[in-house]
Image (tube, coloured by chain):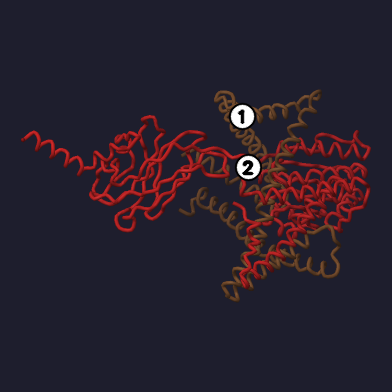
């Protein structure tokens, strides 16, 4: 009980301390900021140590004898070579491997989801709506197809945005901006819920004004 | 006479209770295993069993899955409440329930079949009624046993052959364009406002005698946006070193710190100022998203940088960072492919690289043949996509109107 009360007071102090930044930079904010950074860095160090070095490297890789993990373990050890000035260059190899592997993996994923599935859905939704015959449905899918097409034209870098091509690209950026407007409103609402969460903490957990 | 009558009576009773039928199975059934499973009831008059049970390896997977299908019980609509799937590893091992399907469903996938392990299967048509687990083991409501069958991994997913062909086409285009770029031929890339402003923004910091902040996002090196951010950082470092302007790179991931240091060091070397590079220019803050944002906010307010770059993957901290930078009077250039964060950067920053522009930036800035060729190759892919959309809509509409049987969408289907 005592510990939770102390914890709530510390959390409330830090929450209010961070919020004082809304007025201006001040000593309380600096203290809260320093505690936040230090504690979170320490927390993540411990979390990553136990999750990776202990559970994956030691328990599964060494004790569990899962030799397929040794590829990753060796790369990890190579990465640690960076701590030495003499053999620091070895750390470039695992780095290159990670970047290359990620690029290859995402190339396949993006080509599948962002290219083929997107193109297929654009075509099939429009043609199906024509088949159904509902005018609102057809107009909606024409807008989607036009947005996809003109958006792609905007992101085509090999041709100057002039003439018909430029006009289509302009339509594309309008579609993108309208989408941003909708996303802006949606995300602002979700940010409000974060603020409400902190105020709820202050009023219920700390001040006990809300039961 | 009495012994004979008794024997006949026993035979009749055995037939009626179904025990002799269960004995026909070639795989022994351990009723104890079935009893202990979650079987609550079986009809006093059990439904007829499902037939034509088949168990086959799931195609185009990494192994570990077997697909079962059967013909529904003739009593499916009347007596059957569900189908129980029983599995045995053979060699006298008992059958155990591994799953169930609803009435009228005639397929099931066993996702725990391991790799190259033989299994036998049978399916029980389960009806309503009193608890009588012995009935479960009878053949009155149980399909014939199938097996042995096993699952294997496939090296190639034939359902994604079209993806391979598409990728080969794009990669071939990239290689061809790289060769063209290496031959010295000028490759045209249209102007991108946000990238054009990079040099001016660094020049502003030089004129004002203030530092530059470069924020590479909060994701690790396993994110494409962070990877795309690193070459841009290298170019920014090169210009900053040439202008003798201090570049500060706070990061939230240790791997990003290592990579960013390499990029900045290379940038300083290209500018002919390797002596000016200090490893502490690229420094770790914390992995925590909002801890990182709080730290950068404090640094921006206190150190008042003239220019801030936000290039990489950002989440909820995007507006916190961009608003603070804006309030501090810095010129800000952002670039991200996070759709939900782009609106905030568009509103709070002077220039924003939208999605694909972030990936094009490094090629545009460096004019390096490999990057330029890669960008042109991607444009080739986009050209194909544009063509596919127009052609696909026309052909599919013609197909619908005149039943031509072209089936253009099959080319784009992915299993």
Specify the quadrant that holds the N terminus of chain B.
top left
Q: Nearer the viewer, mark 1 or mark 2?
A: 2
Circle 1: element type: helix
Looking at the picture, tell me which residue is in the foreground, A198 or B339. B339
Q: Is residue B414 left or right of residue B109?
A: right
The x, y position of residue A83, in whole percent, is: 75, 26
Q: Is residue A118 left or right of residue B230?
A: left
Circle 2: element type: loop
Q: Residue at x 74, y 45 (%)?
A: B226
Q: Which residue is mark 1?
A: A68
Indicate the chain coloured brown by its letter: A
Q: Are marks 1 and 2 on the same chain?
A: no
Q: On screen, A3 above or below A131?
A: above
Residue B316 in view: no
Q: On screen, B413 above or below A14?
A: below
Q: Residue at x 41, y 37 (%)?
A: B120
Indicate the chain coloured red by its letter: B
Q: Is residue B84 left or right of residue A121?
A: left
The x, y position of residue B154, in whole percent, is: 59, 40
- Chain hosting mark 1: A
Q: Measure how far apart labels 1 and 2 are at the Cα level.
A: 21 Å
Q: Which residue is mark 2?
A: B156
Which corner quadrant of the image does residue B145 belong to?
Answer: top left
Which corner quadrant of the image does residue B400 belong to?
Answer: bottom right
Callout 2 crowding tier (Cα within 10 Å): few <14, some 14–19, many ≥20? few
Residue at the left extreme? B1
Q: Is residue B83 left or right of residue B306?
A: left
Q: Residue at x 85, y 49 (%)?
A: B177
């Amino acid at each position: 009980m005592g510990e939770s009360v102390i914890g709530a007071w510390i959390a409330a102090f830090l929450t209010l301390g961070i919020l004082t930044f809304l007025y201006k930079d001040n000593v309380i904010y600096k203290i809260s900021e320093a505690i936040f950074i230090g504690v979170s860095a320490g927390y993540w160090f411990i979390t990553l140590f136990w999750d990776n070095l202990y559970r994956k490297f030691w328990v599964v890789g060494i004790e569990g004898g899962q030799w397929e993990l040794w590829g990753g373990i060796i790369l990890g050890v190579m990465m640690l070579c960076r701590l030495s000035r003499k053999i620091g260059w070895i750390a470039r190899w695992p780095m290159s491997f990670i970047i290359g592997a990620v690029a290859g993996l995402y190339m396949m994923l993006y080509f599948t989801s962002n290219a083929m599935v997107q193109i297929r859905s654009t075509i099939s939704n429009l043609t199906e709506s024509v088949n159904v015959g509902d005018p609102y449905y057809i107009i909606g899918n024409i807008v989607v197809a036009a947005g996809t097409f003109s958006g792609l034209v905007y992101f085509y870098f090999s041709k100057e945005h002039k003439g018909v091509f430029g006009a289509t690209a302009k339509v594309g950026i309008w579609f993108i901006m309208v989408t941003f407007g909708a996303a802006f409103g949606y995300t602002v609402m979700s940010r409000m819920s974060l603020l409400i969460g902190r105020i709820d903490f202050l009023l219920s957990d700390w001040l006990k004004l809300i039961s | 006479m009495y012994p004979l009558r008794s024997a006949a009576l026993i035979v009749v009773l055995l037939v009626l209770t179904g025990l002799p039928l269960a004995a026909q199975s070639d795989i022994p059934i351990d009723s104890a295993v079935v009893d202990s499973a979650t079987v609550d009831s079986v009809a006093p008059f059990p439904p007829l069993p499902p037939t034509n049970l088949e168990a086959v390896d799931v195609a185009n997977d990494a192994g570990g899955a077997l697909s079962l299908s059967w013909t529904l019980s003739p009593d499916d609509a009347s007596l059957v409440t569900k189908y129980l799937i029983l599995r045995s590893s053979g060699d006298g091992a008992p059958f155990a329930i591994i799953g169930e399907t609803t009435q009228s469903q005639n397929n099931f996938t066993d996702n725990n079949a391991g790799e190259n392990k033989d299994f036998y299967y049978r399916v029980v048509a389960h009806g309503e009624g009193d608890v009588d687990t012995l009935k479960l083991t009878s053949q009155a409501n149980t399909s014939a046993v199938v097996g042995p069958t096993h699952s294997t991994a496939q090296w190639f997913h034939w359902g994604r052959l079209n993806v391979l062909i598409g990728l080969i086409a794009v990669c071939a285009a990239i290689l061809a364009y790289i060769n063209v770029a290496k031959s010295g031929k000028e490759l045209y890339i249209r102007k991108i406002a946000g990238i054009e402003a990079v040099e001016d923004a660094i020049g502003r910091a030089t004129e004002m005698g203030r530092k530059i902040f470069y924020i590479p996002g909060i994701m690790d090196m396993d994110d494409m946006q962070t990877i795309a951010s690193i070459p841009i950082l290298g170019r920014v470092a090169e210009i900053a070193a040439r202008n003798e302007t201090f570049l500060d790179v706070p990061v939230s991931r240790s791997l990003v710190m290592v990579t960013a240091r390499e990029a900045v060091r290379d940038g300083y070397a290209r500018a002919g100022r390797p002596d000016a590079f200090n490893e502490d220019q690229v420094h770790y803050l914390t992995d925590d998203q909002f801890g990182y944002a709080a730290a950068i906010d404090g640094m921006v307010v206190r150190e008042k940088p003239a220019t801030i770059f936000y290039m990489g993957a950002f989440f909820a901290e995007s507006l916190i960072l961009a608003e603070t930078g804006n309030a501090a009077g810095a010129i800000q250039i952002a670039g991200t492919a996070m759709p939900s964060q782009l609106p905030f950067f568009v509103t709070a920053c002077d220039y924003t690289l939208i999605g694909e522009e972030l990936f094009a930036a490094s090629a545009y800035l460096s004019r390096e043949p490999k990057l330029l060729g890669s960008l042109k190759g991607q444009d080739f892919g986009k050209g194909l996509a544009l063509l596919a959309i127009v052609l696909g809509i026309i052909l599919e509409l013609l197909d619908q109107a005149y039943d031509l049987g072209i089936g253009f969408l099959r080319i784009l289907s992915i299993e």
